[in-house]
Image (cartoon, grey):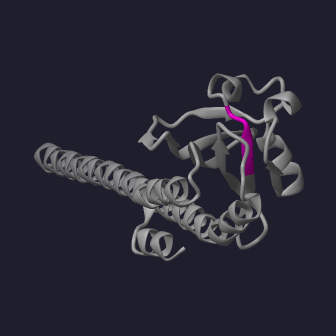
Amino acid sequence: MLNIAKGVSATTGEKFFYSLAEHLTDILNADYAYIAEVMHGKPNRVRTLSLLACGKIVDNIEVDLAGTPCETVFDKNFCSYPSCIQNMFSHAHMMAKMNVEGYVGTILSGSSGKRLGLMAVMYRKPIKNVTMVESMLLIFAARASAEIERRQSEDALRKAKEEIEKWNEELEKRVKEKTEELEKSQAKLIQSEKLSAMGQLAAGLAHEINSP
């Protein structure tokens, strides 16, 4: 417990998720560990933020929840299958390829109760101390949830700043265009007034010349 706390307390972002997954597999003797985030606009799909397999970092993947224990996690907020998981989820083909036997997963929720993602550990053999595994996941689910929420807030703030900058650039562009149009209109007006004045002067001179 202390090792995990030290490993994740000072990290944020991508490093945090990999650090947490790494420590979970180490402390819980799990073969696999992952932390996943719900994909925007795709509530039935998640994308891993960290994925470890047999102690090695694996490229992040997208996962369809249908027919998997992850779907149960989203329905019940938590699920635990100490053994024989392949018999219960015959459509979870990826788990079959990974020879997963035991699974424990928990939902990751934001401060408002919004479902942010899930975190789970998996075993190739039946889980011996399932109670300890369950307790460990629940303890660190809050920290993982907070980091995902912080990350999403940071992304939202960055996008808002980019939009404001874009609006400012567009506003500056329009102000510049309108200023140039105004300057051109003023120049035309001045030219017209000069021509009008010259015309009036020429007419006055012609009148004086023609008058005795």
113 shown above or below 21? below
Q: Position of residue 126 (x, y in %)?
A: 73, 43
Q: Position of residue 162 (x, y in %)?
A: 43, 56
Q: Is residue 30 magenta?
A: no
Q: What is the span of residues highlighted in magenta in the rendered image? A: 100-104
Query: Dominant secondary structure of the magenta stretch?
Result: strand
Q: Residue at coordinates 77% horizontally, 43% vertically from top-left?
A: 70
Q: How many marks?
A: 0
Quarter-wise, where is residue 172 in the image? bottom left
Q: Is residue 101 magenta?
A: yes
Quarter-wise, where is residue 146 in the image? bottom right
Specify the quadrant that holds the N terminus.
bottom right
Q: Position of residue 176 (x, y in %)?
A: 31, 54
* Residue 76 visible to the viewer: yes
38 shown above or below 175? above
* Residue 167 visible to the viewer: no
Q: Is residue 110 left or right of residue 21?
A: right
Q: Residue at coordinates 56% horizontally, 65% vertically from top-left?
A: 153
46 shown above or below 212? above
Q: Residue furthest front?
A: 128
Q: Position of residue 115 (x, y in %)?
A: 75, 57
Q: Residue at coordinates 59% horizontally, 64% vertically from top-left?
A: 144
Q: Is residue 207 left or right of residue 41?
A: left
Closer to us: 53 or 173: 53
Closer to us: 188 or 120: 120
